[in-house]
Image (cartoon, grey):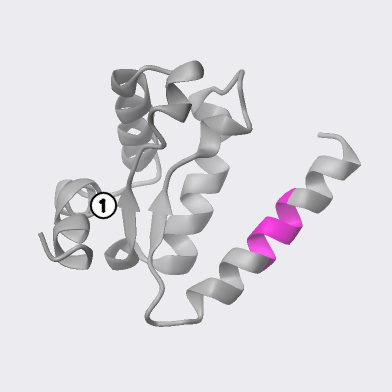
Amino acid sequence: MPYDNMVSINQWKEGMSTLAQQANVSCKLSGLVMFQHNWTVESLQPFLEYALNVFGIDRCLFASNFPVDKLHVTFRQLVEANLQVAKEVGLSKQEIECVFHDNACRIYRL
């Protein structure tokens, strides 16, 4: 990975860690394909995994950035990629339900 990308990723991680220290901040897991037009599950995983780790399961929620994401991915592909990452990083069925449904209902008071 080029040095510039590593610096940017490290800055992103620092920013996410700082935000995660605020108990009233949640993290929408979205918009990653806007910057990775040739994305893969493997390219998304480090970002999703880091956010899940620093914010915790109860403060993360899956979201899409549609219609902008539609330029590079279908909604189905996006959901499937995020589900695959969730399973690969070891989230339980209950934790997946939290990230993909329950947290949004709670945070947005739906």
Q: Nearer the viewer, residue 28 or 40?
A: 28
Which residues, given as a range, are shown in magenta? 9-14
In the structure shown, which secondary structural element does the residue marked by tag 1 occupy?
helix
**Percent x, y for residue 103?**
21, 60
Q: Nearer the viewer, residue 10 or 33?
A: 33
Q: Residue at x 22, y 49 (%)?
A: 92
Please determine whether, in this image, residue 85 is positioned above or below residue 105.
above
Q: Nearer the viewer, residue 81 or 87?
A: 81
**Percent x, y for residue 98?**
19, 55
Q: Dot 1, how many residues are within 10 Å of its Cα: few (below 14), some (14-19), or many (20+)?
A: many
* Image quadrant occupied by the C terminus: bottom left
* Image quadrant occupied by the N terminus: top right
Q: Residue at x 34, y 31 (%)?
A: 84
Please determine whether, in this image, residue 9 is positioned above or below residue 73.
below
Q: Identify the residue under disc 1.
A: 99
Quick check: is 83 in the magenta stretch? no
- Quarter of the view holding residue 18: bottom right
